Image (cartoon, grey):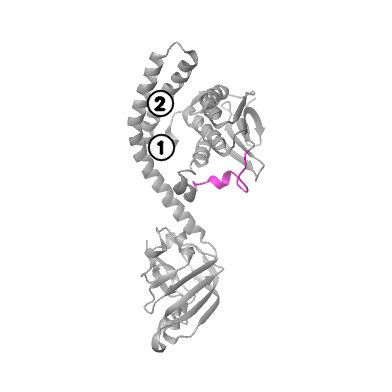
Amino acid sequence: MNVDWRGRSGSVCSVKIIDTWYAMALFDFSVDDQLRITGCNGAFGRMRVESSQQLEGLPYYEVVPRILHQNRDGVLQVVESRQPLSLSGYRFGCFHQSFEADVTIQPLPGGNGTSAGAQVVIQDLQKCEMASRLQQSQHLIDIGKMASILSHGVRNPLNAIKGAVVYLKNRYGHEANLVEFTDIMEDEITRLDKFITGFLSTSIYEFDQSAVDLNSLLKKIELFTSLQAKTAGVEVSFRSGQVDTIQINAFQVEHAILNVVNNALHALPIGGKIDISSNTENRPEGRFAVVEILDNGPGMPGQGAETFAAPVRESAQAKGKGFGLFITREILQHHGGLLEIHSGLDRGTQVKLLFPAANGGQG
C-alpha cells in the first residue's frame, strides 16, 4: 500500500507499509550511508512482519515517513555533514492525523573520517489510530477467509462424530442419561451442519429468528456443560427467573452464552464457582430478557464490553483465542441487544446478555 506523507516542509514522500506502521514511545533505528536500515529496536516488532530483519536493507523512508529538515532529508544531512541534528516537536503528518515528536539523529563514524550512516531516535510519538484500525480490519479479513476454509473442513469430522453418536445411542439405548446426552449431541451436530451451510451462502444478519423461551435454552445449556464443569472441578449453578419470550436465532444465542460460560470455565481454578441466572429488566431503552453469568475468577482488569469490539490479534495468534467475546458481542448487536461486562483484578467477572423482549417492551 502506497500512501503520501507530508513532513514539516510540506514535501511528499511515499511510504509502502503505512497501514502497518505504529507510532512508538521510543522508535530507534540505524541506517547506512545509503539510508538503508541496518538495525532497529524492538518497536519494529509491532509491524506486521515476521521479524525486524525483514526490514533491514530497506530505505528507512519506506518504513517510516521521511524526516525533512530545511527542505532536505534530515538523515542524509547528518550522514553527509557528520554533525548531529535534533528536531524538537517535529511534525509527522499522515492521511488521517498529524503527530509531533522529538527526533534525534546522530552520525555513525566510519573509517578514515568518513560516515558509516546514522542513528535515529524518535521519542514520544503517539499512536496512529487509523493505522490501528487498518491493521485490525486486515485481521478481520484474514479471519473471514480462514472461517470459510474451516467451515468446509469441519463437515467430514462432524459426519464421523454423528455416526459415533448414533452408534452409542443404538448400542446403549437402555441408559436414560446417555440417551439424553446423545439426543442433544445429535441435534447440535445437525444444527451445526445447517449453520455451516448457511454461513457459506449468507451472513450472520440473514439467519432466521423465532420466538424462544430463554429458560428452556438455559436448561439445555446446563445439561450441555455439566460434564465439562465436573471435569474442570468448577461448580456451576443455574437459576431461572421470570422472563419474556424473545425473538432470536436460538443457535446463535446458545453459542453466544456458551462462549461466555466456556471463558469462565477456562479462567477458573478447581473449586471455582459460576452462577448463571435469567431475569427481566426494564430500562429506558425498553424491556429486556437478561442472562447474567457471574464467576469468582481472577477477573479482567480494566476491561468492558467495548474492549471486545474486535478480536485481540496477539492472543488470537498466540493461543487461538480472542474470538469468543467478540462473536458474542456481534450476535447481541445483531439481535438489537446489549452486552455488559464488569470485571476487576481478583474481583471476578459479571457478564450480562440483554435481549429485547419479543412483545416490544409491553409488560
Mark 1 or mark 2, earlier in chain: 2
Q: Label 1 is placed on what type of residue? A: Ser
- The reply to whether callout 1 and callout 2 are in contact (CB within 8 Å) is no
Residue at 56% from the left image edge and 47% from the top image edge: 307
Residue at point 49%, 78% (across, down):
105
Queried whether the magenta region covers residue 213, the answer comes back as: no
Q: Which amino acid does label 2 sit on?
A: Ile
Q: How crowded is mark 1: few (under 14 residues within 10 Å), some or many (20 or more)?
A: few
Label 2: state its secondary structure: helix
Residue sticking out furthest to the top: 174
Q: How crowded is mark 2: few (under 14 residues within 10 Å), some or many (20 or more)?
A: some
Q: In this view, does 296 lie to the left or right of 7?
A: right
**Residue position for label 2:** 189
- The quarter in which the C terminus is drawn is top right
* Residue 57, quarter of the rendered image: bottom left
Say left or right for 192 vs 346.
left
Magenta-highlighted residues: 297-311
Return the residue nearer the eye: 112 or 79: 112
Q: In this view, does 34 lie above or below 47?
A: below
Indicate the position of residue 96 as horizontal and vertical percent values: 49, 62
Seen at 37% across and 26% down, the residue is 161
C-alpha separation, residue under disc 1 versus residue under disc 2: 20 Å
Give yes or no for residue 306 being in the magenta stretch.
yes
From the viewer's side, name the closer residue of 20 and 183. Answer: 183
Q: Mark 1 points at which residue?
A: 203
Q: Residue most toward the bottom?
A: 112
Q: Can residue 13 be seen in this view?
A: no
Give the percent coordinates (x, y) of residue 64: 44, 68
Q: In this view, does 95 lie above or below 291?
A: below
Q: Where is residue 30 in the image (x, y as percent from the top left)?
A: 44, 73
Q: Is mark 1 on a helix, strand or loop?
A: loop
